[in-house]
Amino acid sequence: MNTDKKNIDDFINNNLEKKVVVVQGLGFVGAVMSLVCANALTEEYAVIGVDLPNKQSLEKINKINSGIFPLESSDPKIQLFYQNSLDKKNFYATYDEYAYSKADVIIVDINLDVQKISVNFGDLESYDVTLDPFKKAINSIALNCKEEVLILVETTVPPGTCKKVVYPIIKDVFDSRNFDIGKVSIGHSYERVMPGPNYIDSIQNFYRVYSGIDEMSSKKTEDFLKTIIKTDEYPLTKLHSTNSTEMAKVLENSFRAMNIAFVVEWSRFAEEAGVNFYEIIDAIRMRPTHKNIMYPGIGVGGYCLTKDPLLASWSRKNLFNGDGILKQSEMGVRINDKMPSYAISFLKANLLAQKIKLKNVALLGVSYRSDVGDTRYSPVENFYLQLQNFTEKIYLTDPYVKYWDEIQKEIILDFKKVLSKSLDSVIITTSHSEYRSSKILLDLLMNRLLLAYRLNVRLLYLY
Amino acid sequence: MNTDKKNIDDFINNNLEKKVVVVQGLGFVGAVMSLVCANALTEEYAVIGVDLPNKQSLEKINKINSGIFPLESSDPKIQLFYQNSLDKKNFYATYDEYAYSKADVIIVDINLDVQKISVNFGDLESYDVTLDPFKKAINSIALNCKEEVLILVETTVPPGTCKKVVYPIIKDVFDSRNFDIGKVSIGHSYERVMPGPNYIDSIQNFYRVYSGIDEMSSKKTEDFLKTIIKTDEYPLTKLHSTNSTEMAKVLENSFRAMNIAFVVEWSRFAEEAGVNFYEIIDAIRMRPTHKNIMYPGIGVGGYCLTKDPLLASWSRKNLFNGDGILKQSEMGVRINDKMPSYAISFLKANLLAQKIKLKNVALLGVSYRSDVGDTRYSPVENFYLQLQNFTEKIYLTDPYVKYWDEIQKEIILDFKKVLSKSLDSVIITTSHSEYRSSKILLDLLMNRLLLAYRLNVRLLYLY
């Protein structure tokens, strides 16, 4: 592997007197976090995004450096912020760990995955958390960083990770480098990024919780966050332990995941009782204490809600030797994972019985959530795979997804092109605004040609 | 048993030209519902409250008829509304089913219980729903009522009850009475009563959901509700089936119960990780989507949250032959039921180890919820029973409970009298406002003499 040292040095030389922020990981969080740092509110940063030297990441890195932002988004601020960074020449991307040596702040935005073992399209049998790639990433920072750097972990981690995993790694490496471990700062502040029309605002204009492994770390984290977030409008909340902030993050997502699972279970009961579940939920939402009650959909997807409750439960058992698992949160994941399979059973039972054909079907939307192009753990994947068994042809369309990585398929962006095919059924699998506001789809609904309508609107909206 | 026929006839004769509302059941809902009807907004009703001729109910009936409202309450409107009804002489109470024969509207506000079989103070082993007392009550209405009455069920029932239980009973009896079943109206509209400082408002000034077994029933229910509820400010929501409204009620309470169980499980994890769970919850509540996340406490009590999820799950299995139970909602009850036992273990593990004495202990609050005098299924009961095993003397106090029925004990109303005793520990078991605003208790807290403080505030507030 060649080094990128010269380019990094050039970039730093062109941005003299700017503090350097290095973002580790250029995924859905890191890429946009980089933009927010390059457009900081009260400071001019030189921002370097670092990702692994594999094919997919190298493509991303090359795009960033050649004037193309690698994520599709419905948020116009993304392009605006990216263009600013091009104009100011303060954003560079690289695969080279040498970048860490230049950093005043290193933001950890890499993934930390849960390995799920599932059978029958979503029936969770077991799971495990492998910390190795995360540990390796922290190790590469420790090996290259300056002594007085602030390492700010944003990755969603099992509670306890900063103290029990990150700190020991850095301490070991610092000892071997003859660095003073007392000089490094380790902070934790989790993102609440929502890819979609408010992508940038979900970082820059939103509440944040933070902590540090000691007072200095906490203070440095606070000072840094104040330069990139509108903290006068969205005040920061300081917690007194990294265990607390790490727990808060997975708790938030578990709360959501469990509340979806809750309505899923009740929606089955509603179907058995022959009542309109959406009408019931709307009635209950009138109560201020019940405003947050959710709607069911065909499934829960994305990178967070599908795994965060398991990260927590795993941590309770493995990092804190706790008295059992988080039963209710794990059950939430189990119920949600089976949603697409249930949608398929529902289809089979209710539609095939009515002799509605499913020969040529169009699925509108493949991403996991409305108005985003993120297909990671999309419930549409399991739905699609199972639907193949009793259809001849499935047309896939999504305005935000050109290529569906997980299925390795080109996706038609314009749903109208799909509607022009000879179709038996159209199923709205993701509730993109474009579909919800479409006159054509509304007509199909009214004429009851749109399958979603017949599916008790279960398939019309994802949660 | 003597009849009360003459008194009822006299009451009706003194209230000629008023429509007659009979409320079946004079418990925490029925007694106050009677007051709201006697103080209706757009109509003058003559209201008769009916309860069973047992010792406890007869005491209540006698009190109502002799100028004493039988419920302790922190809501000043209760006394005001009751005084109005005394002035207008439009509220009478009786044990005599003859009252139903006078009714234009009969409101069913009796209990429908779940029999739980628990071991080890709260470990739910099994449960069952016995409909017999409810069926008997409906039967006595059917035997006595007029043909064109509106029967409005407010009781929290297993979904399906109006159609599968109430209607068949009334039809059978009407057939035998040569009444036209087509003339009776059966509506369902569940209350959202909150005993406490807004007791009356939780009926008169709050959102309502309603339905009827047919269009006429639905319309009559709506018309009636409009006379007692401020529907211009709190519009009614009509659902299209009694199954739906019945389900909505138990769903609402299951949602709450499960969300408490959720934080309970996480609070255990927080203790294991040595972090302040309340700090975490406060941080998360900053998010508008997470505002409703709850605090844990020593337990969940009261008549609704402890059983409603089971009513629903039972109904799914037994009335609709559904595909399984409502697992997550049942688990919520299971987790919550064990909370007092957990609080005891926590006490033992953390306090006895620190050699804090529990010889003479005061429990502040015995009701299940702040600022109410309702002790039904109060978690303090299980807590108290277990605490007895390793204390010599437990003083009990509660400003709203003169006599604790379940434990058969006199309760000291003024907590200051209890504090004057020689005490080792004081535990706030119910978060009555009086305690929260007390300077004396605050001083105890600051001097760390108040056990609640040492218990990671777990015992300071009920949810």
Image: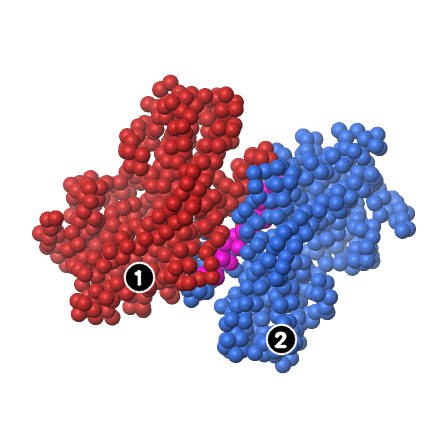
Chain colours: A red, B blue
Q: Is residue B110 left or right of residue A141?
A: right
Q: Which residue is tagged 1?
A: A165
Q: Nearer the viewer, residue B291 or B16?
A: B291
What is the chain letter for disc 1? A
Local packing at callout 1 (Cα closer than 10 Å; few below 14, some 14-19, many 20+) is: some
Secondary structure mostly seen in the magenta stretch: helix
Q: Quadrant of the C terminus of chain B?
A: bottom right
Residue B255 drawn at (x, y percent): 55, 48
Question: Where residue A405 sits: x, y (%)?
Answer: 29, 37
Number of on-image labels = 2
Question: CA separation, marks 2 and 1?
Answer: 44 Å
In the foreground, A29 or A233: A29
Q: Residue furthest top?
A: A422
Q: Residue at x 71, y 40 (%)?
A: B152
User: Which residue is located at x 82 percent, y 38 percent?
Assistant: B143
Mark 2: secondary structure = loop
Answer yes or no: is residue B114 visible: yes
In the displayed image of the protein, which residue is found farthest to the bottom?
B422
Q: Position of residue A277 (x, y in %)?
A: 55, 37
Task: Inspect the magenta stretch and tell me whether residue A314 lies in it.
Answer: no
Residue B256 included in the magenta stretch of the image:
yes
Position of A416 relative to B12 (above/below): above
- What's under tag 1, amino acid-wise? Val
**Residue pictured at 26% horizontal, 60% vertical:** A151
* Residue highlighted by disc 2: B391
Q: Quadrant of residue B212?
A: top right
Instruction: Name the residue: 63% across, 34% down.
Output: B241
User: How packed is label 2: few (under 14 Cα within 10 Å), some, or many (20 or more)?
Assistant: few
Q: Is residue B188 above or below residue B305?
A: above
Q: Are marks 2 and 1 on the same chain?
A: no
The span shown in magenta is: B245-270
Image location of residue B379, percent across then percent down: 62, 61
